[in-house]
Image: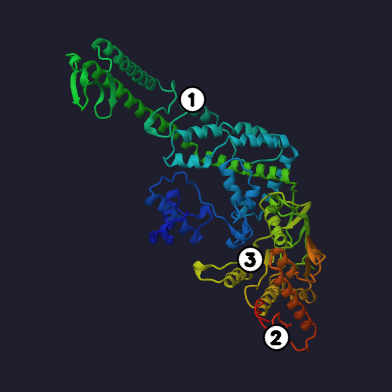
Amino acid sequence: HLHAAQPYDGYAFLPDPARQMLCDHFSVHSLDGFGCAEAHSAVAAAGAILHYLVHQLRRPCDHLRTLRMRENAQHVLIDAASQRNLDLIDSRSGKKHTLLGVLDRTKTPMGARLLRDWILHPLRDRDALLKRHDFIEALLAQPFILSKCRESLQGIRDIERTVGRLSQGAGNARDLQALAISLAHIPALQEDLGCLGVPHSEGLRAFPELVDHLQASLAEEPPANFKDGGMIRDGHSPELDELRSLSRDGKSWIAKLQEDERKRTGIDTLKVKFNNVFGYFIEITSSKLAKVPDDYTRKQTMANCERYITPALKEMENKVLGAEERAKQLEYELFLQLRQEVCKDLVLLQRAAAAIAEIDVLCGLAETAQTHGHVRPILEDSRNLIITDGRHPVLEQTLVEEKFVPNDTTFDPADSLLQILTGPNMAGKSTYIRQVALITLMAQTGAFVPAESALVGMVDRIFCRVGASDDLSRGQSTFMVEMNETALILNHATDRSLVILDEIGRGTATFDGLSIAWAVAEHLHDVVGCRTLFATHYHELTDLANTRPAVANFNVAVREWNDEIIFLRKILPGAADKSYGIQVARLAGLPKPIIERAKSILSHLELNSAKPDAKKQGPKAKNTKQDAMPAANAPQMDLFGDF
């Protein structure tokens, strides 16, 4: 959905007014207690948002009880381009083909939102991650407890959003009922978690008195609209019960009146009706008007009938309508009292909702690990990264026609910090390098990982630059988009970052692209010193291993058979000896004459490359013309020209 952005009062974004807005809301003299007094831009943004909620939307904000800074030092930073390239949340193929889609086995809306946040903001706090891993390990050791916990979570609804609506005066009786149903599941969840033997969130607590009060007060199926009545259960309020009884008895009397009047007047078509303008009335068709009794008072004349009232009908109408109106008003007052009682526990309810969300995420991750054979990673403060039989967490679940091939990964600061990966298209290079990033990310969200074993030296940022397309809205070409993303990496990567690069420089002329790729690789090795996976078709880059101590070459294994290639999907040490581009083109369905012509051109290029002093002439064309081949050092070559 597209939403039009509208400018908002710039005054609200000024630091001083924004700070005062926040101080007034939290009833404090300064923001020092929240740890954000010096975060001027963040304070300005938060103050402006609060100003908009209060003055523009006119929303009550009593449920906003604290400020919390999201410190960069606490989380792994993943820029927007890397999030897209890794398919963390969104994918052109749909949510099923994202990391979120594979990991999301949450039972509650709060859990689903929290998992999304964990994926986009992995942790750098090793102690916090170990607690998450301990919890998942305990659940896997007791599958029955895991099943029981997920069963309890199944009945819990969106407590966070429900409490938020109630605190803003926007919730209805159904929200109260949903809250009571959700809170009623907490004791069973607490009992199950008590059997694990590991600590869980301190915010999880039961609300037995509140649940009992709500269940005793609310009707079993309350309406969504206040005006409909029927929100409060019979027996909760004697006054309300009396008004309802009067209303029900009056309606029964009116229904009986129709039968009695038909018998008394002999008018079998007589009807007692009601509308909002005239209230209750007796309707008689024009053909029966001669039988109308003298005690009927005409109220309205219609085309085919007359409408009447009687003193008894009018008296009962006053009783019935008065009782209905008073009952609805009383119900609304009782509902407001219930809502106010819930808001007294607002902070405790918010903490409980946060605890349930965390438990839900961890239970979902435990089930994912149980189902797909994920293992607990070892976390350490180093630049090592050792993965045995690692698998792509998304692709292994979505492959249909072939079995996923696992691969090992070993980063050692001494001899393999920058790994250059060569091999043909479609062989699996992009899958492998993304796989390493995703396993690292999963380990630092607190999840188990798809591997036989994994030792992860924790990272501070994850960069992933793969593929690119034109950004027409900003007037940027494919190459400019590629360079922008590369510049971001070079300017912000540290020695604790993980960098994934795929085909740097392919968007420009061959030698320009090779030069850029070479310089980028040198900088990441010599200056930044971060763990880098560099997939490329520039085989010249493999020479870096001869001049740089921590550069290692790897290739994706293929097997040739009868002029065909078979992708083995296995990562092996050493550089690839061939690109197999023509074979891949055949697999893609290029016409046979194009394939044969490409072979001829390739043979000529390889021959000239082997004989640098030889005269560079093109192969004889299919027609009688013979043109010279482009120079070997030409930046580009038109493969579809007339040779």
Residue at left 79%, top 51%? Answer: 452
**Vertical relation: 628 (above or below) 81:** below
Residue at left 44%, top 20%? Answer: 235
Q: Which mark, by number, is residue 467?
A: 3
Q: Are marks 2 and 1 in contact (CB under 8 Å)?
A: no
- Is residue 309 at all visible to an observer of this figure? no
Residue at left 42%, top 55%? Answer: 20
**Front residue of 599 and 166:** 599
Q: Are marks 3 and 2 in contact (CB under 8 Å)?
A: no
Q: Amino acid at mark 1?
A: Ala
Q: Give the residue furthest to the top.
A: 264
**Vertical relation: 93 (above or below) 612:** above
| Discs 2/1, front | 2
Q: Which mark, by number, is residue 626?
A: 2
Q: Which mark, by number, is residue 227?
A: none
Reading the chain from its start, which is encountered first: label 3 or label 2? Answer: 3
Reading the chain from its start, which is encountered first: label 2 or label 1? Answer: 1
Q: Position of residue 409 (x, y in %)?
A: 77, 60
Could you give the CA–CA distance between mark 3 and mark 2, rounded to whole angstroms? 38 Å
Could you give the CA–CA distance between mark 3 and mark 1, rounded to whole angstroms? 60 Å
Quarter holding the C terminus is: bottom right
Assess disc 3: are there few (<14), some (14-19) or many (≥20) residues with their C-alpha within 10 Å of its C-alpha.
some
Q: Amino acid at mark 3?
A: Gly
Q: Position of residue 385 (x, y in %)?
A: 75, 60
Reading the chain from its start, which is encountered first: label 3 or label 1? Answer: 1
Circle 1 residue: 216
| Discs 3/2, front | 2
Assess disc 2: are there few (<14), some (14-19) or many (≥20) residues with their C-alpha within 10 Å of its C-alpha.
some
